[in-house]
Image: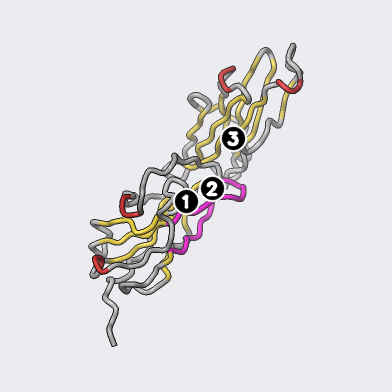
Amino acid sequence: MLLAAVILLGAHPGIGAAEDPTLEITQAIYDDAGQPWVGAGFSPDSTIGAATWWICQPGRECAQAPSALGWLKAGPVASGTIFEARADFQGVAYVVRSPVWNGQLSPTSRPSLKGRPIVGQKVRPVGANWTGGWGQPGDVSLMHVEACRTVRAAQCVTLSAQGGQYPRSGAPPTLASRHVGWYLFAIDARYSRDSAFAGGGYSAAQFVPPVRVGPTVIRSRPYGPVRRRQML
């Protein structure tokens, strides 16, 4: 939950205060293009009604937007926009507002990789810098390290992957001899603090599929190729 209802017009008849419903922002996240995706619903019973959404851009009146089941994918909107969910239940009007939108989520730098591309060495990914998105703290970068057969990041395998869905795969990887001649990449996948993930299903990093890059998933420059350690 991000924000409790900010406006509650009237009292809810026939129900004690402890049982009164509230309209809440359930998630404020990003779509694959780095644009706003926001949901709202009643609590504690989400089935009593569905919210409609209004987009309030700076200097304009709020305008209703198409939504489905309490969710809005807004597409490109101006920085400073606020999204407003509205719903009615038993004659009572409920309104809740999102955090401020600061424009499309975009990287201002690439991620990088610390460590030498030598067999037996550990490498550590360092996150990119980002701008835009929701005007609240708590966004997170989940970092991956991939080894690829080519400098253009083709035929890749995962060496490490952070995130709750990869519970045993996030440690900095140690480079193996099987990757001699391959190139290394750091991957930064950026998520809102409200993002939810399924439980982990991978027993090791090597089974995690390579990440598909896009506006919210950024790849570093290539590092390497990986070489064998020189013997003295």
User: Height in image: 167 above or below 11?
Assistant: below
Q: Which structural element holds mark 3?
A: strand
Q: Which residues are magenta?
A: 125-143
Q: Which residue is mark 3?
A: 83
Q: Name the N-terminal-most of marks 2 and 1.
A: 2
CA gap, disc 3 and disc 1: 21 Å
CA gap, disc 3 and disc 2: 13 Å
Of residue 63 and residue 103, the one placed in the foreground of this image is 103
| Mark 3 crowd level (few <14, some 14–19, many ≥20, 10 Å Cα) | many
Question: In the image, which disc is placed on residue 16?
Answer: none
Q: Which residue is mark 1?
A: 190
Q: Which residue is mark 2?
A: 133
Left or right: where does residue 135 sit relative to residue 159? right
User: Height in image: 145 above or below 17?
Assistant: below
**Which residue is depicted at the point 43% across and 45% down?**
165
**What amino acid does circle 3 point to?**
Phe
